[in-house]
Image: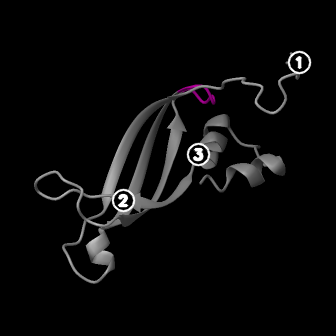
């Protein structure tokens, strides 16, 4: 979930340099399911939970193009949530991605692009 994008876009709060606005809008909060494998590589344990926070920064201060990101996550195995089992440590992910804008006309196929 990117909680800052919609309010900032809706109230027209994009006032600073593009790189700052895009970085704030790219801040994410994650809550999800986590599957862990045992030492044999099989997924026999019940699912766990992961909670994360991260952001991305555009390299050229534009929405399209290369971005670098960082995301931290706290993770709990299913056995840890039920009161036993070894704990998982926190995780840090560093990413490189390419963002692009695709004009798909999903809402109304009859819409025309105005330029």
| Residue matched to label 2 | 34
Mark 1–mark 2 CB contact (< 8 Å): no
Disc assigned to residue 26? 3
Span colored in magenta: 60-65
Q: Dot 1: what SS?
A: loop
Q: Earlier in the sequence, mark 3 or mark 2?
A: 3
Q: Dot 3: what SS?
A: loop
Disc assigned to residue 82? none
Q: Earlier in the sequence, mark 1 or mark 2?
A: 2
Q: What colour-coding does the image apply?
A: one colour
Dividing the picture into quarters, in which one does residue 38 lie? bottom left
| Quadrant showing the N terminus | bottom right
Question: Where does the image place residue 10, in percent across and percent down from the top left?
Answer: 82, 49
Residue under the point 64% across and 47% down: 25
Question: Where does the image place residue 14, in percent across and percent down from the top left?
Answer: 75, 44
Disc assigned to residue 114? 1
Overall secondary structure of the magenta section: loop
Q: Is residue 109 above or below residue 33?
A: above
Compare residues 87 and 99 and report the one nearer the observer. Answer: 87
Whether residue 16 appears in magenta in the rendering, the answer is no
Label 3: few (<14), some or many (≥20) within 10 Å?
many
Residue under the point 29% across and 68% down: 77
Figure disc tally: 3
Q: Residue furthest left?
A: 40
Mark 1–mark 3 CB contact (< 8 Å): no
| Quadrant showing the C terminus | top right
| Alpha carbon separation for disc pair 3 and 2 | 23 Å
Nearest to viewer (mark 3 / mark 2) = 2
Q: Earlier in the sequence, mark 1 or mark 3?
A: 3
Q: Dot 2: what SS?
A: strand
Q: Residue furthest bottom?
A: 83
């Amino acid at each position: 979930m990117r909680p800052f994008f919609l309010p900032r876009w809706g109230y027209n709060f994009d006032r600073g340099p593009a790189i700052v606005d895009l970085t704030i809008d790219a801040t994410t909060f994650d809550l999800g399911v986590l599957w862990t494998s045992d030492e044999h590589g099989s997924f026999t344990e019940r699912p766990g939970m992961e909670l994360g926070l991260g952001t991305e920064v555009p390299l050229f201060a534009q929405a399209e193009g290369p971005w670098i990101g960082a995301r931290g996550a706290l993770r709990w195995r299913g056995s840890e949530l039920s009161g036993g089992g070894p704990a998982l440590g926190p995780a840090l992910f560093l990413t490189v991605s390419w963002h692009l804008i695709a004009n798909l006309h999903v809402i109304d196929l009859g819409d025309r692009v105005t330029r």
